[in-house]
Image (cartoon, rainbow, N blue to C red):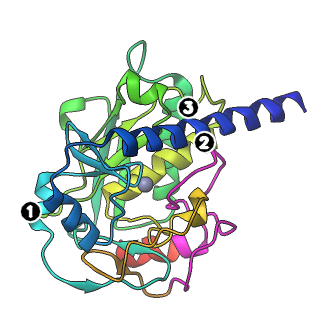
Amino acid sequence: MRKSILLLFSLMVIGMITYSCQKETLETGNEIPTKVIEQLTAMGFNPDGIEKVDEGYRIERDIIITEEFLEHAGHEHRVPGVEQYSTNNLVSTGGNRVITMYADEGRRGYSAAMIAGLDEAINRFNAENLSIAFQRISNRNQADIVMTRLSKRDERRGVLGSAGFPTSSGDPYGEIKMSGILESAYGLSTNGIATIIAHEMGHCVGFRHTDYFDRSISCGGGTSNEGTAGVGANHIPGTPTGASLSAKSWMLSCTDGSDRPFNNDDQIALDYLY
Ligand SMILES: [Zn+2]
């Protein structure tokens, strides 16, 4: 009983930190060029709370938009209000591709609990027998995706992770910035940690948020629909109309820290893309 209350408390803290930092971002305002905001809106992204970060811009809490991505965001697509979306850029597999990952371990890197979460996330993708597979390696220089700690400031203010979308040349996004305190500060289980890491891996290979068209589905608050015209939110055939919190897609915008293994629609979407 005591344990569940503590977990609930931690999750409330996550929520409060997130909300307060979004508010702070909105109030202080960032120096974001209007053109960038217009471009993101046209692509169906929600630019509320956009932040300038080293790699480019951070939106929808955890998506990194690089200059490269903005440059190559070309053609018009209709954005339907239904479930499961991908960006235009996907990872080229040539039929079969192993995506290697590296994560710092130890004092300045990740705890054993975080590494266990990463390994579980990798196992989940590999269990789907896709044309992409993931493998953790010990050489940073040979890795396609490097998982590094968020800044201490971001970790303290409750950012959980961030990642971007595949490059125009068909490579996965190369960096996941992940909080290192998911277990130590929030008490998340290996499966809870794996869910968040698998979510960021999903962005790296081209998944958008399942509920990107109305983030209030998983984040609460008011309805926030980004509009009807844009680029790069392609509905994945075979996945249903609408998104729901109860279906617990691993690509929902907001997490409550719980375990969200791939549901049936997630599996259809993974299988369709890879
Ligand atoms: Zn996300």
Q: Is there any visible trace of residue 11 in the rendered image?
A: yes
Report the residue marked by disc 3. 182
**Quadrant of the picture in which ligand 1 is shown:** bottom left
- Mark sitting earlier along the chain (2/3): 2
Q: Which residue type does callout 1 highlight?
A: Glu
Q: Residue at x 59, y 59 (%)?
A: 221
Q: Which residue type does callout 3 highlight?
A: Leu
Q: Which mark is residue 33?
A: none
Q: Main secondary structure of the magenta part?
A: loop
Dot 3 crowding, Cα within 10 Å, few <14, some 14–19, many 20+: many
Report the residue marked by disc 2. 15
Of 253 and 100, which appears nearest the observer? 253
Q: Residue at x 15, y 81 (%)?
A: 75
For the C terminus, the image quarter is bottom left
Asked whether 252 falls inside the magenta stretch, the response is: yes
- The stretch of residues the image draws in magenta is 239-266
Q: Is residue 42 above or below residue 135?
A: below
